[in-house]
Amino acid sequence: MTRPPAPLPHPSATRAAVTVLAVGLLARLALAALLDPGVDEAYAIAVSRQVQLSFFDHPPMAFWWVAAARALAAPWLGDPVPAFVLRLPFVLAFTATSWLLFDLTRRLWGPRAGLWALVALTLAPFFFASAGAWVVPDGPLVLFLAATARCLVEILFFRPEGLTERRLWLLAGLCLGLAGLSKYHAALFAFGAFAFILATPHRFHLARPAPWLAAAVAVITVSPVLIWNANNGWVSFLFQSSRGGGGRGVSWPGLGRAVIGQLAYLAPWTLVAAVIATVSRLRVERSLAGPTAFLAALALPSILIFTAVPLRGGDALPHWQMPGWLFLLPVLGKAIATLEAKAGAPSRLAHGFAVATSALLAAAAGAVLFLHFAPASLDLPAKLRIEGFLSESLRWRGLADGLVARGLLPKTPPPPGTAAKDRPLVVAFHWIDASRIAEELGDRATVAVFGPDPRGFAFLSDPADFVGRDVVVIGRPKTYDRGHGALLPFVERLDLQQPITIRHGEGRLFDAEVAIGRRLKRPYPLPYPKR
């Protein structure tokens, strides 16, 4: 296979890409500064207070980033550290991801193609907000997957020699391992890359030691996940695998939600155009060994497997497929650049869709900001029946002050390094409630979930350490009503207190139920026996 010629420099496209990067960075910084953490972010912020080799829901990378940001900022800003500071590593990481995707596309097909791939990535709602600005594992995942893909593109299609090739293989292995430390999706990326190499003339690489050394580096890098799971009954793998099917037969509504969700998360024109561009490019290249086939091999496992989950009775969340769509955006960029080259002018259609997507994204951001900064009256959320959604999506302001005023919470955090058992114990009956509680209380209390689905909270403390002590019980009215009966056999009595009003601006979001469980008689049994 002959080496493709290096694309000619195109300074205007590169300058435009830098502008897109800068504008996207500023927009994500604004988003990170203005919005409360989502419930998944509050959960990550809560469970990251105890650094572990890995965590119940996901590998540790996102939680490590939060812990590192907190450790650096807490001496200066106090605890709890503002959400914007905890989000900052994720915002900066996605800027690096954006550049990597632009550079990968530019290397294959020129800077104009890279620019359009970058525009599509920047305007995709999921990548703009969730992967681009929020405290979730998707941000680290797409960064390290993009870095791995960039190394592999250089190896497979530009044939570096000698030491340079070996270094690229080892760097690819390291980046893949870091992706594995971010989210389990990395396994599907690895499968797609290996299948492509094995099934094409690129398989000659497998006769050399470098790819296998790279695989060893990846396994060693991801070993904290394996060690933690081995010590905890493989609970994380069991939990994640259980989400992929329900054994209830085909769920057509679930399949519809999976497809519509992907259209919404990526933007409909982007998804449809990426599919058309990929099929068209495969026909043009007439080879399953070319760069389009390679990118499709990286993309399709995540897209097809998670879209098919409802066919097994499961209910797939549409963000599960997004790391796959990341690798079809370069193909879309190439298709638009090709159309522009043929027409001798910028693509009006692509520009129109970009403007329309920007307008929709701005409108959505405006609607979210309106709900966040709306006047104190909650009449509109009540009419829209989204009070429950807001109780999960907004901080529980006023909770900490209310507990301090009643003497149920210390005014200041204990000294750094204070053990979980030496703090007051606050109990919730649902992991979402616990996440919001822990977000507000910081290090002043140990938060536990007494219920059938404690998730990562089960690994932060041992209920046996609190036997003989009073516990503070907090929850939204519905979760409290559903859960408090199961607690009664474990305490001498449960004294209901006056509710604490959770504020939204100057208005009331809801009244949190508060009770005191007198003298915990025995440890509450958690569903993960090996912890």
Image (tube, rainbow, N blue to C red):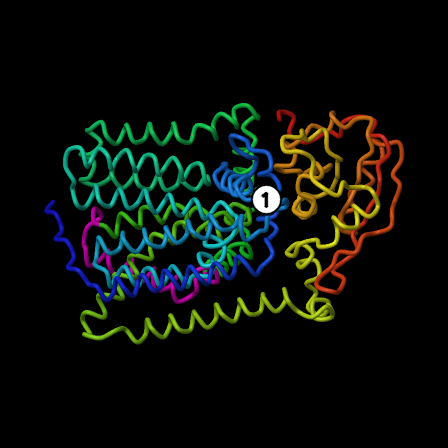
Q: Compared with residue 312, is residue 345 higher up or lower down, i.e. above or below?
A: below
- Is the magenta region chiefly helix, strand or loop? helix
Callout 1: 10 Å neighbours few (<14), some, many (20+)? Answer: many
Q: Is residue 282 magenta?
A: yes
In this figure, which residue is indicated by the disc labeled 1?
45
Residue 376 falls in which quadrant of the image?
Answer: bottom right
Please say whether residue 528 is visible from this viewpoint: yes
Residue 336 vs residue 511: left or right? left
Report the residue at 55% width, 70% height from top: 366
Which amino acid type is marked by label 1? Ile
Residue situated in front as seen by the camera: 490 or 324:
490
Identify the image quadrant of the N terminus: top left
Residue 487 position, x and y percent, is 81, 36
SS at badge 1: helix
Magenta residue check for 183: no
**Which stretch is magenta?**
263-290
For this rendering, which residue is in front, 28 or 68? 68
Place of residue 453 in the rendered image (x, y in percent of width and height, measured from the top left): 67, 39
Q: Give x and y (percent) for residue 85.
A: 53, 50
Q: 258 and 323: which one is in front?
A: 323
Q: Is residue 244 visible?
A: no
Q: Residue at x 23, y 30 (%)?
A: 210
Q: Give me the residue at 39% from left, 41% from top.
A: 188
Q: Is residue 434 above or below residue 264?
A: above
Q: Position of residue 26 (x, y in %)?
A: 44, 62
